[in-house]
């Protein structure tokens, strides 16, 4: 049955599903949340996501003042993610108009939590862009469910 002026869809948007998960994660019973919602983001990212290279800074950087060399290693991990623009309400005047919001799952990262020392590479208009992570919000029960990254293209 349909109400005039409204259309019903069989498949919810990824934003609607992730919004339901976000609301549920505000509840107190974390283990039930993990059992119920942990498989959902992986399905959404597999269906609607695109490949993004997540660059983990895995070892501490060390600067040698004698040689001027910086040592340390990065680890590249291909993750599925959903890229979108920031809404004016989300930006609160803190972000630049070129900043981007990227949602990534935890299937590829496991229990690793993103840090602001990490970076991402993503496709945009036929090119690969690299961006610095400037803000991270992790939705979780007892374990991470998905991460929202605010990134600044370099």
Image: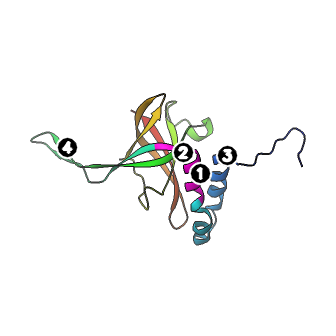
Q: Which residue is mark 3?
A: 13
| Callouts 4 and 1 close, C-beta under 8 Å | no
Rendered view: 58 above or below 38 = above
Q: Residues within 10 Å of mark 2 (few under 14, many from 20)?
A: many
Front residue (pair 102, 97): 102
Q: Quadrant of the C terminus?
A: top left
- Residue at 59 percent across and 51 percent down: it is 44
| Callouts 2 and 1 close, C-beta under 8 Å | yes
Q: Quadrant of residue 8?
A: top right
> What is the CA distance from the residue labelled 2 to the residue labelled 1?
7 Å
Q: Residues within 10 Å of mark 1 (few under 14, many from 20)?
A: some
Q: Which residue is mark 2?
A: 49
Q: Answer with mark 2 or mark 4, whichever residue precedes in sequence.
A: 2
Query: Is 5 on the left or on the right of 85, as rendered?
Result: right
Q: Is residue 49 magenta?
A: yes
Query: Is 113 on the left or on the right of 19, as rendered?
Result: left
Q: Answer with mark 3 or mark 2, whichever residue precedes in sequence.
A: 3
Q: Answer with mark 1 or mark 3, whichever residue precedes in sequence.
A: 3
Picture disc at residue 70: 4
- Residue at 57 percent across and 67 percent down: it is 34
> Disc 3 on helix, strand or loop?
loop
């Amino acid at each position: 049955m349909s109400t005039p002026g409204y259309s019903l869809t069989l498949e919810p948007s990824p934003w609607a599903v992730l919004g339901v998960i976000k609301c549920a994660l505000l509840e107190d019973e974390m283990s039930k949340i993990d059992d119920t919602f942990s498989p959902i983001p992986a399905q959404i990212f597999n269906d609607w996501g695109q490949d993004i290279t997540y660059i983990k800074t895995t070892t501490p950087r060390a600067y040698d003042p004698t040689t001027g060399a910086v040592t340390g290693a990065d680890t590249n991990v291909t993750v599925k993610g959903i890229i979108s623009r920031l809404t004016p309400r989300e930006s609160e005047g803190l972000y630049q108009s070129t900043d981007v919001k990227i949602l990534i799952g935890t299937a590829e990262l496991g229990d690793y939590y993103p840090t602001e020392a990490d970076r991402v590479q993503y496709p945009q208009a036929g090119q690969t862009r690299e961006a610095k992570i400037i803000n991270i919000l992790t939705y979780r029960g007892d374990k991470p469910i998905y991460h929202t990254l605010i990134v600044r293209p370099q």
